C-alpha cells in the first residue's frame, strides 16, 4: 500500500502547477515582437529562445522533482531573455525580470532567493531611471520580492512534506521488516520442535513396521495427534496476524491519508464488533482508503459506524471526483466477502464517492467466521 500512496502523493495536483499559469504574461513580449515585420533570423531567435525558456520554467517548477540547479538555470535564462528582449523589441522584456525573481525563489536558500531578486530589482530600477521603462512600472518591483519570497516559502514547505513522506516510508519498511522477523521467529518456535518430534516418531514407526506393527501403529497415531495439535496452533497463530481490528486500521488510514494531504474525520464512536465483522470492516476501510489515495483527489474522508438492532452500518465517504467508473478487483472482492456473511455493499459516485456496508449484527457470526477462514 505504501508504494501506491507514494505514487499518489507525488502526482502533481492542480494547485502545485499554479506557477505555470503566469506564463500567460508572455503575451506582452509576443505582442511587441509581432507588432511589425521582423527579419527571419530575429524571428527564429525569438521563438526558439521563448520555447526554451518555457521549457526551463516548467521544469523548474515540477513539484515531484524539485532541484535547486534548475532555479539557478531559470534565473540565468530569464536574464538572457531580458537582454535579448531589449535588443529585439524593447521595454516589455521587463516581464522576464519578474519571471527571474520567481524562479530564483524556487530553491532552499532564502539568502540566495533575496540576493537574486535584489539583482533583478536593481535592473528594473535601472530601466526606469534610464527611460526604458515607465515610472508606473514601479508597482511591479514589489512583485519581484513577493514572487521570490513566496516561491521560496512554497519550496521549503514542499521539501518538508517530501522529507515527512520519506520518514513515513522508512518507518513502514522498518515495521514490515520487524513483523516479518516476528512471524519467522514465532513459526520457528512454534513448529521447529514439533516437526522434529514428528520426523523422529515417523522414522521410529518405519523401523517398527515389520518387527512390532502394534507399536508402529501407536507411533503413527501419536504422529497424527501431534500434527493435529500443530495445525491448531498454526491456525491460532495465523488468526493473530490478520490485523489488529478496526481501530488499528483507522490509525493506519489516518497515517496514509495525512501523508496524502487528506483529512480523516470519524463522526461516531465505534461500537464493539464481532470478530468476523470487524475483520471485514477493517478490510473494507483499507480498500476504500487505498482507492481515495490512488484516484479520488479528495481533501477529506468521513468514516462513521453505527449499530441498528439487525445490522452494523459502515459509511466511508470522500469529497473527491466521484463518478461511476467500473469497480476494480478490490471492491468486487469485498462485495463477495460481504455477500458470504449476509451483508451488502452500496456505492454512490455523486458528490464524491460514498461506500456503505451493512454487516449482520446477529445470527451470522458462525457463517462469517467460516467465510473469513475460506478467504484467508
Image: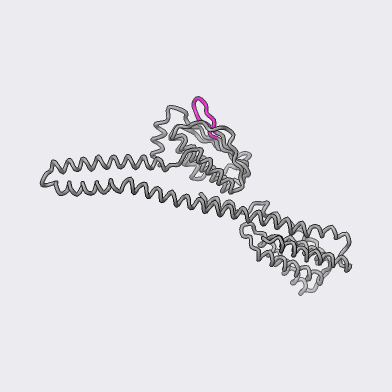
Q: Position of residue 18 (x, y in %)?
A: 70, 54
The boundaries of the magenta stretch are: 305-314
Residue situated in front as seen by the camera: 238 or 94: 238
Left or right: 264 as drawn, with respect to 97: left
Instruction: Note whether 106 is above or below 347 in the view shown.
Output: below
Given residues 96 and 203, the one toward you in this image is: 203
Is residue 346 located in the magenta-colored stretch of the structure? no
Give the left or right position of residue 153, taking residue 302 as reference. Answer: right
Q: Is residue 197 visible?
A: yes
According to the image, what is the colour scheme of the structure? one colour
Above or below residue 100? Residue 5 is above
Q: Principal SS element in the magenta part?
A: strand
The one of 310 and 345 positioned closer to us in this rendering: 310
Total marks in image: 0
Q: Position of residue 26 (x, y in %)?
A: 77, 61
Q: Position of residue 302 (x, y in %)?
A: 59, 38
- Which residue lies most toward the front here? 111
**Which residue corresponds to the image point at 24% horizontal and 41% vertical from the top-left?**
224
Residue 63 to residue 349: above or below: below
Amino acid at each position: 500500500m505504501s508504494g501506491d500512496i507514494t505514487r499518489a502523493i507525488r502526482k502533481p495536483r492542480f494547485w502545485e502547477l499554479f506557477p505555470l499559469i503566469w506564463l500567460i504574461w508572455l503575451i506582452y513580449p509576443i505582442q511587441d515582437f509581432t507588432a511589425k515585420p521582423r527579419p527571419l533570423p530575429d524571428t527564429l531567435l525569438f521563438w526558439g529562445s521563448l520555447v526554451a525558456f518555457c521549457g526551463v520554467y516548467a521544469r523548474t517548477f515540477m513539484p515531484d522533482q524539485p532541484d535547486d540547479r534548475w532555479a539557478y538555470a531559470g534565473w540565468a535564462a530569464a536574464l538572457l531573455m531580458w537582454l535579448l528582449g531589449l535588443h529585439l523589441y524593447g521595454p516589455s522584456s521587463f516581464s522576464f525580470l519578474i519571471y527571474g525573481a520567481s524562479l530564483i525563489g524556487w530553491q532552499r536558500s532564502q539568502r540566495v532567493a533575496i540576493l537574486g531578486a535584489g539583482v533583478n530589482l536593481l535592473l528594473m530600477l535601472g530601466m526606469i531611471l534610464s527611460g526604458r521603462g515607465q515610472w508606473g512600472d514601479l508597482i511591479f518591483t514589489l512583485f519581484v520580492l513577493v514572487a521570490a519570497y513566496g516561491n521560496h516559502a512554497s519550496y521549503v514547505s514542499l521539501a518538508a512534506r517530501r522529507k515527512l513522506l520519506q520518514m513515513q516510508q522508512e518507518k513502514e519498511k522498518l515495521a514490515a521488516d520487524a513483523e516479518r522477523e516476528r512471524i519467522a521467529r514465532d513459526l520457528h518456535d512454534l513448529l521447529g520442535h514439533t516437526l522434529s518430534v514428528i520426523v523422529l516418531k515417523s522414522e521410529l514407526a518405519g523401523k517398527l513396521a515389520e518387527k512390532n506393527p502394534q507399536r508402529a501403529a501407536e507411533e503413527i497415531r501419536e504422529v497424527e495427534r501431534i500434527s493435529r495439535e500443530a495445525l491448531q496452533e498454526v491456525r491460532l497463530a495465523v488468526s493473530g496476524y490478520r490485523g489488529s481490528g478496526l481501530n488499528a486500521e483507522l490509525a493506519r488510514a489516518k497515517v496514509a491519508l495525512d501523508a496524502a494531504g487528506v483529512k480523516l474525520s470519524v463522526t461516531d464512536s465505534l461500537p464493539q464488533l464481532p470478530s468476523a465483522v470487524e475483520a471485514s470492516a477493517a478490510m473494507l476501510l483499507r480498500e476504500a482508503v487505498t482507492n481515495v489515495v490512488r484516484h479520488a483527489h479528495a481533501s477529506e474522508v468521513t468514516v462513521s459506524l453505527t449499530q441498528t438492532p439487525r445490522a452494523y452500518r459502515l459509511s466511508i465517504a470522500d469529497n473527491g471526483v466521484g463518478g461511476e467508473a467500473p469497480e476494480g478487483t478490490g471492491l468486487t472482492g469485498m462485495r463477495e466477502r460481504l455477500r458470504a456473511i449476509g451483508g451488502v455493499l452500496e456505492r454512490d459516485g455523486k458528490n464524491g464517492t460514498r461506500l456503505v456496508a451493512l454487516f449482520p449484527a446477529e445470527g451470522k457470526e458462525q457463517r462469517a467466521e467460516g467465510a473469513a477462514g475460506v478467504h484467508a
